[in-house]
């Protein structure tokens, strides 16, 4: 890391916090990503062959590069004594430990909270679990499993066809709540000097996403209908087909927006219709009103409506595919995308965390680490004997693992 980068890292909120991350897939790595972007030194512990997430295909092909920037990598074999001794020495000097393995796995390894807190009472131990304590706690969970269990899939698909959301929403949010738990525990540790166990539950996260629908039932006495079949609170709140074959979501949630929309699309006649005077009137007229608007909108191109809607403060959105976001003008001009070097030496653009601090976005500070790239550096910094470090590095160097710098540069 350059001196300029080091200086920048020292100004980040979590600079000086050391995090040991034993995670895979999305939930745990998402937590580590947030802490790393905030300036923590996040050390990803991988087996000698590397985190299997690196090798996923299909829908999982983007997981590793999306959630593992700004992290160091060490390669150790936890079933071997010297490797485990080195890992425990590293944990002894750490602030935070992250894991997201199946129930019982950490205890079997001797890396559970009760064991590690005896060694390091200041350690904040974060378990990313499928379920918090209760009847389901020993079940295995996936994002799709909890979406089915917690009402989200029911609400997303048409009636009778539960459908998972199109992203790993619970895994990502579960990691986010793990990171929030870390921040709270670090703050408390400043006063008490003691660490704490944090658990983030995938199922409970999804229940929170369904909370509004639970309360809708509590308020109205009527079960919430799946989103495709819902009775909208607003009359104009739908996707319409335009002249150029594009689709656009358009909303008019109040009377002022309704009047502006009618002016823009040349339907002032609708403003005089006594059946459409209020939003509630228009909700009751949706069966005929939306098809009428739809026929009118087919004559308009997206470019014209975009300019008019921006000027008129009408909520709208073209239907965008994920790959089109690389060229999104707002993301590009606002700095919402940043170049990141990945572990094969190529570069890609990645979205940054969706907040700024004093107007600055949190940036990638180092490439995606190669497997075991930082083993020597990290273990030496933890005070491991040079001979032990030499043995661990030599033993685990092989195909796919990090090679000496000169070889990598070639």
Image: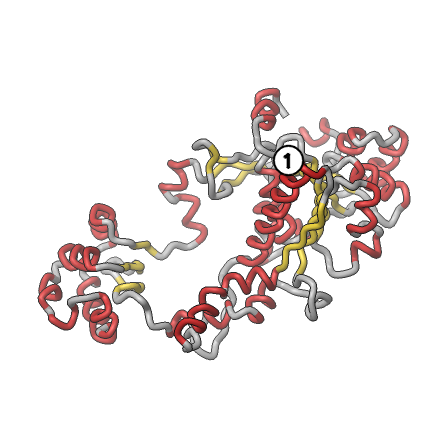
Instruction: For the C terminus, give its image quadrant.
Output: top right
Task: Identify the residue shown where x is 87% and y is 28%.
Answer: 386
Task: Identify the residue shown where x is 57% and y is 46%.
Answer: 66
Q: Nearer the viewer, residue 255 or 65?
A: 255
Please provide percent x and percent y for residue 208: 53, 61
Q: Residue furthest top?
A: 3
How many numbered markers are drawn?
Answer: 1
As displayed, is residue 251 above or below residue 196? below
Q: Residue furthest front?
A: 191
As displayed, is residue 358 above or below residue 69? above
As displayed, is residue 380 above or below residue 136? above
Please provide percent x and percent y for residue 110: 84, 51
Please provide percent x and percent y for residue 118: 83, 45
Instruction: For the N terminus, give its image quadrant.
Output: top right
- Left or right: 179 with respect to 301? right
State whether residue 100 appears in this view: yes
Residue with the mark numbered 1: 40
Please provide percent x and percent y for residue 258: 19, 59
How would you rate the neighbour count of disc 1 (Cα within 10 Å): few for under 14, some for 14-19, many for 20 or more?
Answer: many
For residue 315, which quarter of the picture?
bottom left
Task: Identify the residue shown where x is 20% and y is 59%.
Answer: 255
Q: For numbered disc 1, what is the local secondary structure?
A: loop
Task: Identify the residue shown where x is 20% and y is 71%.
Answer: 281
Q: How is the image coloured?
A: secondary structure
State whether residue 43 appears in this view: no
Q: Residue furthest bottom?
A: 160
């Amino acid at each position: 890391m350059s001196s300029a980068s080091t200086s920048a890292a020292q100004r980040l909120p979590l600079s000086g916090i050391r995090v040991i991350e034993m995670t895979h897939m999305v939930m745990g790595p998402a937590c580590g990503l947030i802490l790393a972007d905030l300036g923590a030194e996040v050390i990803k512990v991988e087996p000698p062959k590397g985190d299997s997430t690196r090798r996923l295909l299909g829908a999982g092909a983007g997981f590793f590069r999306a959630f593992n920037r700004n992290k160091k990598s060490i390669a150790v074999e936890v079933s071997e004594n010297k490797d485990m001794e080195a890992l425990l020495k590293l944990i002894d000097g750490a602030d935070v430990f992250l894991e997201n393995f199946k129930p019982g796995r950490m205890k079997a390894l001797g890396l559970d909270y009760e064991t590690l807190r005896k060694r390091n009472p200041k350690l904040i131990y974060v378990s990313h679990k499928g379920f918090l304590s209760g009847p389901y706690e020993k079940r295995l969970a996936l994002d799709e499993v909890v979406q089915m269990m917690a009402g989200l899939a029911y609400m997303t698909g048409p009636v009778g066809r539960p459908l998972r959301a199109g992203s790993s929403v619970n895994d990502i949010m579960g990691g986010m709540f793990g990171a929030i738990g870390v921040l709270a525990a670090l703050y408390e540790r400043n006063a008490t000097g003691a660490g704490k166990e944090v658990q983030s539950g995938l199922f409970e996260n999804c229940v929170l996403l369904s909370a509004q629908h639970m309360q809708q039932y509590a308020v109205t006495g009527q079960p919430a209908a799946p989103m495709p079949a819902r009775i909208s609170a607003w009359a104009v709140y739908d996707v319409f087909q335009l002249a150029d074959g594009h689709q656009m979501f358009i909303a008019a949630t109040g009377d002022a927006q309704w009047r502006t929309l009618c002016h823009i699309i040349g339907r002032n006649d609708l403003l005089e219709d006594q059946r459409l005077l209020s939003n509630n009137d228009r909700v009751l007229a949706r069966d005929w009103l939306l098809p009428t608007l739809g026929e009118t909108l087919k004559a308009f191109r997206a470019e014209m409506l975009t300019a008019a809607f921006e000027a008129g403060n009408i909520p709208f959105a073209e239907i965008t595919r994920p790959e089109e976001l690389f060229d999104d003008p707002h993301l590009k001009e606002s700095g919402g995308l940043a170049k990141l070097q990945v572990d094969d030496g190529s570069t890609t653009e990645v979205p940054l965390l969706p907040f700024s601090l004093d107007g600055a976005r949190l940036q990638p500070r180092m490439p995606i680490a190669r497997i075991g790239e930082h083993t020597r550096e990290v273990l030496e910094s933890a005070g491991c004997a040079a001979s032990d470090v030499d043995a661990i590095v030599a033993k685990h160097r092989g195909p796919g693992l990090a090679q000496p710098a000169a070889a990598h540069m070639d």
